[in-house]
Amino acid sequence: MADESYTLMTVHEGKSYLPVVESKIQWETQRSGSAGSLSFSIVNDGNITIANGDVVYFKDGKIGVFYGFVFTIKQKKDHILTITAYDQLRYFKNKATYNYVKKETGEILQMIAKDFRLNCGSLASTGCPITRTEKDKTLFDIVGNSIDRTVKETGQLFVLFDDFGSLTLKNIGDMQYNLLIDEETAQDFEYSRSIDKETYNKVKLIYEDSEAGGRQAYIAQSGENINKWGVLQYTDKLDKGEDGPAKAKALLNLYNAETRNLTISNAFGDSHIRAGSLLAVRLEFDDVSISNLMLVEKAKHTYSESEHYMDLTVRGGEFVA
């Protein structure tokens, strides 16, 4: 790019290129279930060779923003190529079968990385070993199930992402960034509160005792919120050895709240911010004021020669995996 603070490079068969970028570069991340992507258009001046599978990396100054691989190339009559590249999480669309015993999420990731030739970086310990059989599931689902189980057991939410070419697992508590979103830094926003999804005020866990031929139900509920919202029930099965009353209470603490979502448009860009980051948000609405940390669910950065801005979808209140 013309702006010297940005570096976009492609690598084809060991040869590196600095392509001439037409218009903007967009980098997008989601907290779960999706790879990070980089999309851009370049001038096909005959001096560059680019093919699917080629390495692409993008830096903002010294910040390694994106490292991934070309997956789509589109060409038009005006010799402009539009490129879409994804980071390593794109390969988590692959399906596999695993039967693992007492493995934390990081250990599962190491197993997957070895089988699918992926690179691991820093993998936080979750303190929650899990035994589970996953049959013909996507790698996203396999890791997501482990993260979900961890948050239900411990109340701690972990985020998987590709950190410039290295699979990384972090506790959201370690992803807090010193950035304030307010009316000065966000051009526009939309706020919503909902009990329609991922809100439950009654938890019912059932243990099926195959040996004794009976079943035991464990219930935790909030009478106050049942009176407000009606019964919103979460039902699930317990595995042998799980603490039914403790797990029911933990799930109620996790889900017994409104989910709050905020979409921020055209905020001043900061390349440290990605899905999974925690930001301070201070905004006022007609019926409520927000002044607390919020979790970035989606982040879309747009870079050009003269500006860098970002669109963020953030969530506050109880964090639900």
Image (cartoon, helix red, strand yellow):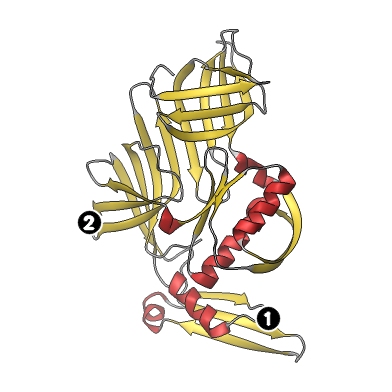
Percent position of residue 176, x then y: 37, 52
Q: Position of residue 161 (x, y in %)?
A: 54, 47
Q: Residue at x 40, y 37 (%)?
A: 271
**In the rendering, at what x and y percent does residue 136 appear?**
76, 55
Q: What residue type is labelled 2?
A: Asp
Left or right, 268 with reference to 124: left
Residue at horizontal 57%, vertical 12%?
Answer: 44
Classify 10 Å Cα crowding around label 1: few (below 14), some (14-19), many (20 and above): few
Q: Residues within 10 Å of mark 2 (few under 14, many from 20)?
A: few
Asked if residue 229 shows in the view, the reply is yes
Q: Give the side of residue 281 with respect to residue 163, left or right.
A: left
Could you say where residue 198 lies in the image, as x and y percent from the top left?
49, 65
Q: Badge 1 is on which residue?
A: 240
Q: Distance between the residues labelled 1 and 2?
A: 49 Å
- Where disc 2 sits, the SS reads loop
In this figure, which residue is indicated by the disc labeled 2? 286
Image: 116 above or below 319: above
The residue lying toward the viewer, choosing from 279 and 197, is 279
Q: Is residue 148 above or below residue 53?
A: below
* Tally of marks: 2
| Among numbered discs 1 and 2, the one appearing first in the sequence | 1
Label disc, if present, on residue 188 of the rendered structure:
none
Name the quarter where the N terminus is drawn: top left
